[in-house]
Image (cartoon, rainbow, N blue to C red):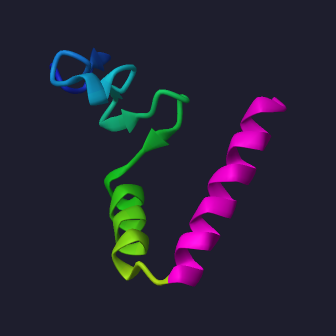
Amino acid sequence: MRMYAYRELSPLDDDWKDWKISKGKLITPDGWPLTSNRIMMGNALIEIGATDELRFQREVLRIARMLKNNR
């Protein structure tokens, strides 16, 4: 129950500043909820590690940040 409630992760390490756990999801500092499936998908994309995929990842992140800032 304690992990289900809103919890900050910043006491763990400075790298976790503004990260939270709420209702079974990891919440990014930008407010994006991450499920375990999304985390595994992201890790799988990183593991592939080919140049084209890394370029694609950077482009997706750039566009996602632009969309977030235009809300």
Percent from the top left, x then y, of residue 49? Answer: 41, 78
Q: Which residues are magenta?
A: 51-71
Quarter holding the N terminus is: top left
- Residue at the image position 30 percent from the left and 36 percent from the top: 24
Quarter holding the C terminus is: top right
User: Which is nearer the eye, 36 or 11?
Assistant: 11
- Residue at the image position 35 percent from the left and 37 percent from the top: 26
Asked if residue 40 lies left or right of residue 63, the reply is left
Residue 10, compared with residue 23, is above or below; it is above
Based on the picture, tell me whether residue 4 belongs to the magenta stretch. Answer: no
Asked if residue 58 lies left or right of residue 49, the reply is right
- Residue at the image position 63 percent from the left and 71 percent from the top: 56
Q: Residue furthest right?
A: 70
Quarter occupied by residue 8: top left
Residue 54, compared with residue 5, is above or below; it is below
Percent from the top left, x then y, of residue 27? Answer: 42, 32
Percent from the top left, x then y, of residue 58? Answer: 61, 61
Based on the picture, tell me whether residue 67 belongs to the magenta stretch. Answer: yes
- Residue at the image position 42 percent from the left and 63 percent from the top: 42
Magenta part mainly helix, strand or loop? helix
Percent from the top left, x then y, of residue 29? Answer: 47, 27
